[in-house]
Amino acid sequence: MTTSLTDLSHDDLSALHQQLSSEHAKLAASGVCLNITRGKPSPDQLDLNADLLTIDVPSHAEDGQDVRNYGGNRGLPEIRRIFGELLGVDVDHIIAADNSSLSIMHDLAMFAVVYGIAGQQPWFGRNVKFIAPVPGYDRHFSICEHLGIDMIPVELGEHGPDVDEVAKLASDPSVKGMWVVPMYANPNGVVYDEQTVRALVSMPAAPDFRIWWDNAYTLHHLTDTERPALPVLQWAEEAGNPDRVFELASTSKITFAGDGVSFLASSKANLDWYLEHAAVRSIGPDKVNQLRHAQYLRDADGVRNLMRAHREILAPKFAVVDEILTRRLGGRGVATWTHPTGGYFITLDVMDGTASRVVALAKEAGIALTPAGASHPLHHDPHDRTIRLAPSFPSLDELRDAMEGVSTCVLLAASEKLLQG
Ligand code: PMP
């Protein structure tokens, strides 16, 4: 039966609600424990890189540096070359650091708050704002929240946010940044198009306004259409704003999420500014791990091949989510969801006003979902509508059970709401 819930008579809706309540009670009693909260690679994906744990690592890098010792703040040329090619960035414009690009983002924000960017005033104690496309990545928002940076949400459209709206916001000199996940955005899989990006790098903005271009998923295609990374640094330079972009990436979802290499790509001036402060914080990154990665991955094609192996594991999981949502929720008028061609997430939009209830019902049924509101600044989803699904970690069987359960919760929450009038 695919009748929309809104078309059901009151009696039919009551009957459906009862049936869903007893399905939910059975689930809750079954003692299942499923978790689709975070975009972690599955054990199968980690096993793809088993050799990384045993590979021999030489003591010296190609430029003669002893990787066991201190120093080398820019990271090893061999790993920067591989990721420079993949990101379309010249090797001189990319530096390699430790395992987390989020740490670099946090450092960049801290340095801006404490020291200021590009000779401008430090942000500390001033009313600084960031443009935050929504839905977005909760940990980006946490950095802002933690440092007292206000966020202005803008809706993320099919190819990025509305550039006129963004340009208007950026014309306010207290707006200092914008979060962008340009390829396969977390959580809705949006891919920014060239027109949008060119507008973002050319719009007038404060001298210390930066686009925080988080390329966490640029190599993470779920289909055989392998789009190249957008050459954002080049476009920024062509637009006369070479310092506009901080570009971030990492191997977290390529090799080991807890033991990879992260990257910052930017203009010479920005990298010098970052390194000036980073050099006080650390005497150099983990170069043994960087060399291990360079030896293991070999070259850009090595990474591309590895990403195809990840895809073989991930794509069936995304297909299962879509299949179950389509079968259980298609035509019921209670939810829409995204069909990403890359990345790690699916966004499930449920009936307005029911996302928190769905998450609570799922919890009672032993299914952990990302908290409702997580994809919005300050956890405030004004429509209480958006839920992020992360299908990567569970096995296919666990994922099937979780999605059947989630579907029941979505229908139950919607029928409750409709019955309440
Ligand atoms: N950026 C985005 C958009 C992410 O989704 C994630 C991981 N969930 C990260 C950054 C974290 O990156 P890293 O592991 O390099 O710190």
Image: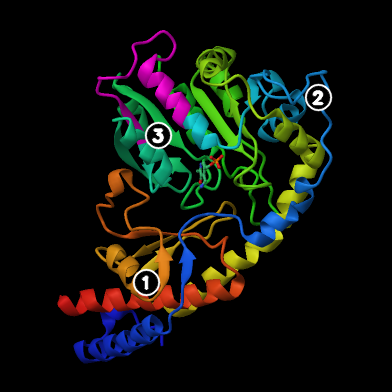
From this view, report whether residue 167 is shown above or below residue 38. Answer: above
Q: Residue furthest top?
A: 119
**Mark 3 or 2 closer to N-term?**
2
Residue 314 left/right relative to 154: right
As helix, strand or loop, the secondary structure at mark 1 comes to helix
Foreground: disc 1 or disc 2: 2
Q: Is residue 339 visible?
A: yes
The disc at residue 280 is none
Residue 319 location in percent, x, y? Answer: 59, 68
List the residue tagged with mark 3.
Answer: 163
Q: On the rendered structure, is 421 left or right of 52?
A: left
Nearest to viewer (mark 3 / mark 1):
1
Of helix, strand and loop, which one carries label 2? loop
Measuring from the top left, give residue 43's x and y in whole percent. 65, 60
Q: Which disc number belongs to residue 362?
A: 1
Residue 89 picture location, percent across and down? 67, 26
